[in-house]
């Protein structure tokens, strides 16, 4: 497989293509469709156009690789290398004009998240990771990513996308954790994980994630020295109940608390 730098260079092409497709629709008049008969799961022409742009380049460069995408289905999932795509993670933020959404491009090798990029083209910030190293490029400047030490839950800053995503049993434990941390921020989507990798945030707890919500983000957090698992300590590759921490000591403490409601 290609080296990390080669993958990053190719991912840059993917991000630039998706940005060209997505940005004209941001903070513009936009029709929003709902993918659910009950509840609200929005999708827009920007989501679909962004994924189409990414998929076209992958098919051209790596025709034997698999693709798992949120908007346009899956192909060759039995391949050793599978790209996992979410063109706009945080569509609710996107339709509100908030720049906390991101384009997620992940690569699984042998079923394991091995490389990921999170791109926010409006603010020109891009996060990369391969599980061993991680870095951020902002306005053309490259910066290494490193999680900060935080051994105690009482000292932690936590993020989650929305408290309403948790079931009653999950919420009882997550609320108890929230009561102990220093502060919590909501509505962060993929940006919460980027901030764990950047050493700004210590903990992200979420549930109901799909593979395309986490595969790109896990190698970024892990490459910065953090830990990403399910609530039972397993691989995050298939999504589900996910916890990401910048410090393994904190992660172990949180897993102990989540264990009684982990699926």
Image: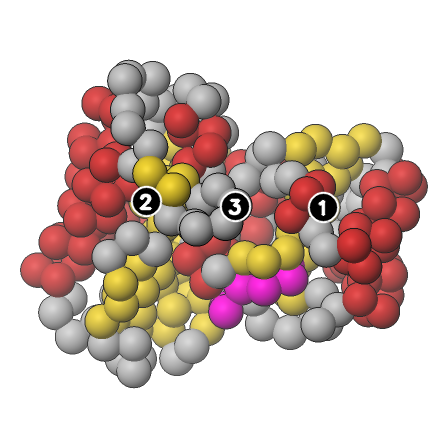
The x and y percentages for residue 250 are 81, 54
Tell me which residue sits at (31%, 70%) in the image. 82
Instruction: Please state which of the two labelled residues, at mark 1 or mark 3, is closer to the viewer.
Output: 3
Say which residue label 3 marks.
Answer: 39
- Neighbor class of circle 2 (other Cα within 10 Å; few <14, some 14-19, many 20+) is many
- Neighbor class of circle 3 (other Cα within 10 Å; few <14, some 14-19, many 20+) is few
The x and y percentages for residue 215 are 46, 60
Say which residue label 1 marks.
Answer: 203
Tell me which residue sits at (22%, 71%) in the image. 75
Tell me which residue sits at (65%, 66%) in the image. 230
Rounded to the nearest whole Å, what is the CA distance between mark 1 and mark 3? 27 Å
Of the numbered discs in the image, which one, if any, rests on residue 87?
A: 2
Cβ–Cβ under 8 Å for marks 1 and 3? no
Residue 167, magenta (yes or no): no
- Disc nearer the start of the sequence (2/3): 3
Tell me which residue sits at (34%, 55%) in the image. 70
Q: In this view, does 175 lie above or below 2?
A: above
Which of the 4 quarters of the picture holds residue 7?
Answer: bottom left
Residue placed farthest to the bottom in the image?
78
The x and y percentages for residue 103 are 36, 41
- Magenta part of the chain: 237-242
The x and y percentages for residue 248 are 75, 59
SS at circle 1: strand
Q: In this view, does 20 lie above or below 11?
A: above
């Amino acid at each position: 497989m290609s080296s990390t730098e080669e993958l990053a260079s190719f991912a840059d092409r993917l991000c630039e293509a998706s940005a060209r497709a997505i940005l004209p629709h941001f903070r513009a008049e936009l029709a929003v469709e709902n993918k659910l008969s009950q509840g609200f799961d929005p999708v827009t022409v920007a989501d679909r156009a962004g994924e189409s742009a990414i998929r076209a380049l992958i098919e051209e460069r790596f025709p034997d690789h698999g693709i798992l995408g949120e908007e346009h289905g899956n192909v060759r999932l039995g391949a050793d290398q599978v790209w996992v795509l979410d063109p706009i993670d945080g569509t609710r933020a996107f339709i509100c004009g908030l720049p906390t959404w991101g384009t997620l491009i992940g690569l699984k090798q042998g079923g394991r998240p091995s490389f990921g990029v999170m791109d926010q083209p409006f603010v020109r910030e891009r996060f990369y990771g391969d599980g061993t190293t991680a870095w951020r490029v902002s306005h053309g400047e490259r910066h290494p990513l490193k999680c900060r030490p935080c051994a105690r839950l009482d000292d932690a800053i936590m993020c989650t996308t929305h408290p309403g995503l948790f079931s009653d049993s999950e919420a009882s434990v997550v609320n108890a954790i929230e009561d102990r941390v220093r502060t919590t921020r909501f509505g962060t989507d993929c940006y919460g994980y980027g901030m764990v990798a950047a050493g700004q945030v210590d903990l992200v707890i979420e549930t109901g994630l799909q593979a395309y919500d986490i595969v790109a983000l896990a190698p970024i957090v892990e490459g910065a020295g953090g830990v990403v698992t399910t609530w039972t300590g397993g691989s995050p590759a298939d999504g589900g109940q996910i916890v990401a921490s910048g410090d393994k000591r904190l992660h172990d403490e949180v897993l102990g608390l989540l264990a009684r409601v982990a699926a």
